[in-house]
Image (cartoon, helix red, strand yellow):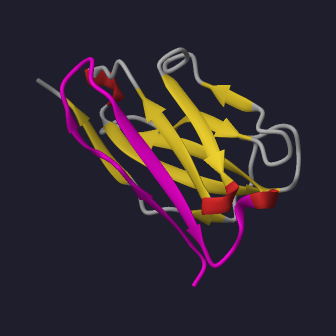
Amino acid sequence: QVQLVESGGGLVQPGGSLRLSCVASGFTLDNYAIVWFRRAPGKNREEVSCISASDDTTYYSDSVKGRFTISRDNAKNTVYLQMDSLKPEDTAVYYCAAEPGARTWCGLGPYDYWGQGTQVIVSS
């Protein structure tokens, strides 16, 4: 079964950290960029970060730059999103998506696979 599964979400206080995981099964991530999106209540989906397939080029939105770090471990077929210095405005459902192609860029779509999402709540 081909799927992406996110995990690692939860409730954290402002200033805290979480590490999200996006695990692929049924296919290998070697030739896929992985993009992390989030959707907060009442807001449009936002592309947060991505990592390219060919050379691990990364992208971060201005809202998370300097606080979030994306990385990949192809041996584990997993991409991580380390989230530090979390703010209440980071509260959202976080999704990962797989973008095909061994390119040096990422985040322009289209996306072959999507995960079901993991909830992150930043609150005191």
Dividing the picture into quadrants, the one containing residue 104 is top right
Total numbered labels: 0
Kindly give the residue lying farthest to the front in the view shown.
75
- Between residue 85 and residue 42, name the one nearer to us: 85
Q: Is residue 25 highlighted in magenta? A: yes
Q: Compared with residue 39, is residue 22 higher up or lower down, i.e. above or below?
A: below
Q: Is residue 89 left or right of residue 27?
A: left
The picture places residue 67, in percent across and down from the top left corner, at: 47, 19
Kindly give the residue lying farthest to the bottom in the view shown.
1
The picture places residue 38, in percent across and down from the top left corner, at: 45, 40
Q: Is residue 35 left or right of residue 119?
A: right
> Which residue is depicted at the point 30% across and 39% down?
41
Q: Is residue 28 highlighted in magenta? A: yes
Q: Which segment did they paint magenta?
A: 1-29
State which quarter of the image contains the N terminus: bottom right
> Which residue is depicted at the point 67% across and 57% down?
98
> Which residue is depicted at the point 50% across and 39% down?
81
Q: Compared with residue 66, is residue 3 higher up or lower down, i.e. above or below?
A: below
Q: Compared with residue 91, is residue 117 higher up or lower down, i.e. above or below?
A: below
The picture places residue 79, in percent across and down from the top left corner, at: 58, 50
State which quarter of the image contains the C terminus: top left
> Which residue is depicted at the point 77% across and 42% down?
52
Kindly give the residue lying farthest to the left in the view shown.
124
Q: Is residue 119 left or right of residue 75?
A: left
The picture places residue 78, in percent across and down from the top left corner, at: 58, 56
- Between residue 15 and residue 49, name the one nearer to us: 15
Q: Is residue 18 left or right of residue 10?
A: right
